[in-house]
Amino acid sequence: MKNYIFLSLVLLLSSCTNLDNLKGSLSESSIEKPWNNVGELKAQSIILNSSAPSGILSDISTSLKRGYVREYNSTYRNNYEVYVGDYVSIPLGIGEDSYNVLYSPLGASYEMEIKDGKLFFRGIYQGNYEVNIYSGGSFSRKIAIQNKLKYEFTEQNNYDVILQEYKTGNLKGLSDSVAVHRIAFPNSFRDKEISFMLIELAGKDGNAKIIKDEIDFLQRYTKLDEYDKLNIVNSLKMIQDKNFIISSALLEYKRSATNLNQEIAGLIMNKNKNTQEEIIFLEKMYETTPDETMGNFIGNWYIKNGNPIKGASYLNNGGENPVDMGTLNPEIKDTKVEENAPVDLEAQNYTQYLTFFEDGKKKFNKDNYVEAIIYFEKALGLNREYIEQKDIYFYMGESYFKTGNYSEAVNYFKKSLNLEKNDEKKAEIYYNIGIVYDKLGDKEQAVNYLTYIRQNYKNSSWSVKASLYLLQQMQQYPTK
C-alpha cells in the first residue's frame, strides 16, 4: 500500500504546502457511516478567489477526519466514483483477492487495501485510477476509480489566484492556493514555476522548512539545472536561522559549475552546524581548488566530530605549521603528522567507509534495499566508529523495514537512536520504532513509543504525525 498524503496534518502546521505522509493500513476506527446513495457525483462549479483555497482544504480535511465511505453493492461495475478525501468501498467477486494499480496521476499518493472482501480506496489527488483485480493470481477484471473534487474550477483560475498571492507577498495564501492546485491538477506543467514562487517568498519570510519541502518536491518530479539551484541558494541566504540542513539536491558536486559551487560552499561555511554530507561537498571542492580557509574549516569540523587524524591532515595542508596530534587528543602521544603512513592508512579506511556508505545510499534511493543492506554491512564491517555510523544504522533500519524484516528494523533503529543527538531526528526514529512495533503486532509498545513522542517532542512535526497515527490507525488501543 502506498503512503498517502494526509492533508489534515498540513492544517495543523503553519503551511498547507507540506502534504506529509501518513503510513498505516485501514482500521475499523478510520471508517465511518457509509453512503448508501451511489448515484453520479456532482461537482459544484465555482470561481476561486483569495479566500477559496483555505475553504477547500478545510473541507477536504473534514472528509479525511470523518472517513466517510461511498459504498457500492454490485460487483459487475467497471467504473466507480468518489470524492477526494472519502473512501470508496468496492465489493469483490468470489476468489478475488489481490490487485495491481495500472495507472494513477503521476506522483499521486493514495491509500488502497483489501479488507473483508472489499477493495477500499482513498486519495488526495484528483484524477483517474485504473486497477486490475486478480483471483488466485489470474486476471479477473479491470476497474476505474474516478477521484473527484466537490468543486470544479479551471486551472487558469487557480493559477491567477496563485499569482495574486505571490505578487502581494502572502506566503500563507500562496501555500494554500498551491496546495489546491496540486490536488486538483496533479503533474501540471506549472509545478516548477509555482514551486519557485514559494521558495522565493519562503526565503523572504525566513521559512527554511517550506524551501526544503519544495526542493524535495522538485527533486522528485523534475530536474534542477544550475540556474534553478542558484535561485534556491539565493533564497536560503536570506534565512536568519543558520541551523537549516541543505538539501542533497544542492550537494551534488559538479566540477564545471564553478559559480554554483562557490555559492553553496559559502552557504555551508556560514552555517552554525554542518552535516557530513555538506562537509563531503567541501572536500570534493577542496580537491579541485585547495583553499586555506576551506581546509581549516573542514579540519576543524572533523576534530570537533571525533576524527582528529583526518582533521589534522586538512589543517596541515591549509596552514604553514604542522598540527601537534597530542594537543588534539591526549591519547595520541608519539604520532607525528609528517609520518604519513598512519595518517594515510586512516584516510584510506575512512575513504573506503564513505564509499560503502554512499553506494548503500544510492541503492536505497533506487529502492534496491537488499543491495543497500549489503553495502551498509560492508561499511560496518570495517569496525570504525565514524560519525556516519548512526546514519548507517538508520538506513539499515529503513532498509529492513522496506523488506518486511521488522525485527531487524527495530534493532537497527534502536542502535541509531543510541548515537543520535539531534532532537528532530530522534523524534523521527522513535516514530519509526513505534510504527515497526505496530507492524509486529505489539500494539502496546507501538502506543508507548508514539505517546512518548507526543509528550517529549511537542514542537516536532513527528509529534503531530504520531498523534494522527494514533488517532487514525489505533483508536482501539488506549493511549497513556
Image: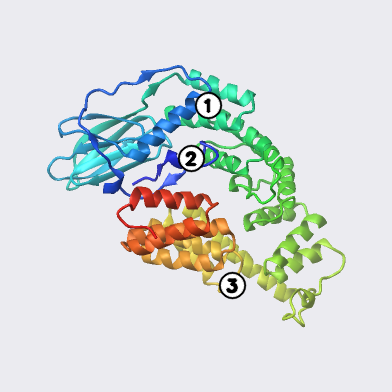
Instruction: Assess disc 3: are there few (<14), some (14-19) or many (≥20) residues with their C-alpha within 10 Å of its C-alpha.
Output: some
In three-dimensional space, the C-alpha distance between marks 1 and 2, rounded to whole angstroms, equals 22 Å
In three-dimensional space, the C-alpha distance between marks 3 and 2, rounded to whole angstroms, equals 41 Å
* 374 in relation to 67, above or below: below
Disc 1 marks which residue?
Answer: 190
Residue that appears at 25% across and 30% down: 80
Q: Which image quadrant: the C terminus? A: bottom left
Disc 3 marks which residue?
Answer: 384
Specify which label sits upstream in the sequence, 1 or 3.
Answer: 1
Q: Tell which of 84 and 306 is nearer to you.
A: 84
Total marks placed? 3
Residue mark closest to the camera, 3 vs 2: 2
The amino acid on which the numbered mark 1 sits, given as a three-letter code, is Arg
Disc 2 marks which residue?
Answer: 10
Instruction: Assess disc 1: are there few (<14), some (14-19) or many (≥20) residues with their C-alpha within 10 Å of its C-alpha.
Output: some
Q: Quadrant of residue 214?
A: top right
Specify which label sits upstream in the sequence, 3 or 2.
Answer: 2
Q: How is the image coloured?
A: rainbow
Residue that appears at 50% across and 64% down: 393
Label 3 SS = loop
